[in-house]
Amino acid sequence: MLHITILAVGRLKEGFWAAGAAEYLKRLPPYARVKVVEVNDEGFSDKSTPAMLEKVVEKEGDRLLKRLQPGTCLVALDQKGVMRSSEEMAGLLDNLALEGKSDITFAIGGSLGLSQRVLERSDFRLSFSRMTFPHQLVRVILLEQVFRWFKIARGEPYHK
């Protein structure tokens, strides 16, 4: 059974994001062990300089890297990453399992994205779209997609 960790900067503050995430976390146990690990986000203001913003991203990145388990396959959610279909991602998860890589971590950055160090440590950079989404919504989308990938891989109804 795959072990999947969603490693995310920040908390789901709005109830509707939390409810959406909870629904998919409730659906996933027959397919994989899934846990969400949150790290604190850094505050910044509209008056923050680019150098200050870079420090924010680096601090958040350091927190993410400290929470990575040794040997995990790290998938960084990155707007500049590779876009894949749901079917392709289902195949990728199957291939990782066949290769004996049963521990997979998906990293979601804060509102400023992921640090360069996290991106460099990643085994794969995945993009859901070239559009920008709130990082809270990305977590819900990721959980839904993970559920969908397992349904596709098992040939179960859900995916259309």
Image: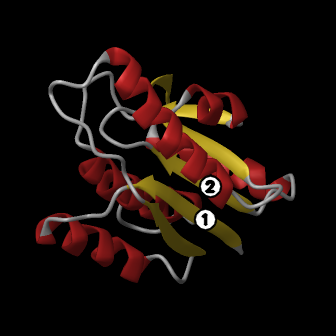
Q: Residue at x 35, y 55 (%)?
A: 139
Q: Splitting the image into 4 quarters, where does residue 76 fall? A: top right
Residue 21: percent from the left, percent from the top?
30, 69
Q: Is residue 36 left or right of residue 154?
A: left
User: How many residues crowd around disc 1 within 10 Å: few (fewer than 14), some, or many (20 or more)?
Assistant: some
| Label drawn at residue 105 | 2
Q: Are marks 1 and 2 in contact (CB under 8 Å)?
A: yes
Q: Residue at x 36, y 60 (%)?
A: 144
Seen from the viewer's position, the closer of residues 100 and 118 is: 118
Residue 98: percent from the left, percent from the top?
83, 56
Asked if residue 67 is positioned above or below residue 132 in the image, the reply reads below
Q: Earlier in the sequence, mark 1 or mark 2?
A: 1
Residue 77: percent from the left, percent from the top?
48, 38
Query: Which secondary structure, mark 2?
Result: strand
Q: Is residue 4 left or right of residue 123?
A: left
Query: Which secondary structure, mark 1?
Result: strand
Identify the residue position indicated by label 1 in the image.
4
For marks 1 and 2, give the CA distance.
6 Å
Q: Splitting the image into 4 quarters, where does residue 55 fall? A: top left
Name, please, the residue furthest toward the right: 100
Query: What's the amino acid at mark 1?
Result: Ile
Asked if residue 45 is positioned above or below residue 106 in the image, the reply reads above
- Is residue 142 something one can see in this rendering? yes
Seen from the viewer's position, the closer of residues 10 and 93 is: 10
Query: What's the amino acid at mark 2?
Result: Thr
Q: Is residue 58 left or right of residue 65?
A: left
Seen from the viewer's position, the closer of residues 80 and 30 is: 80
Name, please, the residue furthest toward the top: 50
